[in-house]
Structure formats: C-alpha cells, structure tokens
Image (tube, rainbow, N blue to C red):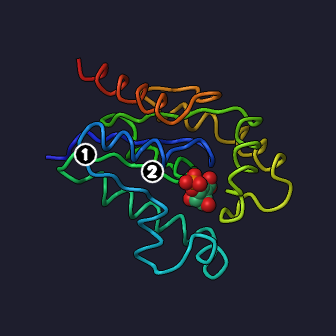
Amino acid sequence: MTAQHVVLVGLMGTGKTTVGKRVARELGREFHDSDADIENREGLSVREIFEARGESEFRELESALLERLLVSDVPLVLATGGGVVLAERNRRLLKGSHHVVWLRATVDTLDSRLRVTKGAGRRPLLDGDLRERLETLSRDRSDLYQDVATSTIDVDGLDSERVCDLVVACVRGDQQ
Ligand code: S3P
C-alpha cells in the first residue's frame, strides 16, 4: 500500500532541503530531494537541464519523479522543487493523502537568505533582479502552495532546527 509521506513545499530558499534532512532523521525515514534526485539521474545540474532542454522538460522529469516517489510503500520525507505545484497533475497527486507542509517565507527573508548563501546562482528562475523574481514567484504561487498544503509554517526568523520541530509536530498532530 502507498505510504503517507511528508512532503515539503515552498519557494526557493525556504529551507526545504535542510529542514527535510533533519525531519527525516528525526522520524527515522528515508529522505529524498527532488532536484538532487533529478540531477543524479540525468547527470546534469538543474541549470544545465534548463539550458540544454528547457524548463518544460525539467518539469516532465520533476512530475515523473514525484509520481515514482509518492507510490513508495515506505514512508518518505521529500523536499520538492519550488515549482512542483505548477502542474495540476502534481497538485492532484499531492492533495489528499500526504502530510504536505508549506514552508512559507516573506520575500524579504528569501531575498536576504539567497544573497547570503549565493543560492540564486544555481537557480535559473532567479536570474536577473532577484527581488523582482521572488516577488513575482511569491505572487503567482502562494495560492498553489495553499491549495496542496495540510499545514503551513511561517519560517521567517526561525532556524532549521526549530522549523524541523514544527514540521514533526504537524506530522504527529495529523496522526492523532
Ligand atoms: C524551481 C525551484 C528549484 C528547482 C528549479 C526550479 C522553481 O528548487 O527545482 O530551479 O521553479 O521554484 P528549490 O526550490 O529546491 O530551489
């Protein structure tokens, strides 16, 4: 039977990978990072896939991976790419039976984090004016994250340890 997975969604820079690793450790579950899985399978970075094959092909790879992971009968923790909610087929898969946690952050938080970590460099959708890109993505996607989320955590000002605790509490709370 398909397991109930913990799936982290949210914009780039919200900490899905860092938090997801911690949550997996805490819950004793296997961890998957969507971008890393795609990069390992294709032998190319996300940026190289965007540049060589285009965003639509990246989205196909992302949807196919999501489908494969969500049918696992082993309960996983999955950090998704920020754009996973764009495809209706992905939203349908996410909705209903999993713990889908939206890590929500203000544009101010994301802007400063991505500048400090230089995290924009490997993210093709952040090329150009970082703040303007983040504002657009946040405006366009907030309703989509809301649509799939079973819980929402405002991560502004919180470190990954605290966010991890909140995610674990959401998951355990849902199970009661
Ligand atoms: C994207 C987010 C990235 C990666 C790709 C596109 C997006 O993942 O999948 O650059 O559309 O928001 P992270 O959210 O893990 O950075």
The response on whether ligand 1 sits within 8 Å of label 2 is no
Q: Is residue 94 visible?
A: yes
Q: Mark 2 or 1 closer to N-term?
A: 1
- Residue 124: image quadrant is bottom right
Q: Is residue 173 left or right of residue 114?
A: left
Q: Identity of the amino acid at label 1?
A: Arg
Q: Is residue 27 left or right of residue 99?
A: left
Identify the disc placed on residue 90.
2
Residue at (75% x, 45% y) in the render: 134
Residue 127 drawn at (x, y percent): 78, 62
Residue at (66% x, 62% y) in the render: 123
For the residue labelled by badge 2, is the local secondary structure a helix, a strand or a loop? helix
- Quarter of image, ligand 1: bottom right
Q: Is residue 145 placed above or below 55 in the rendered structure?
A: above
Q: Nearer the viewer, mark 2 or mark 1?
A: 1
The residue wearing badge 1 is: 29
Q: Identity of the amino acid at label 2?
A: Asn
For the residue labelled by badge 1, is the local secondary structure a helix, a strand or a loop? loop
Q: Are marks 2 and 1 in contact (CB under 8 Å)?
A: no
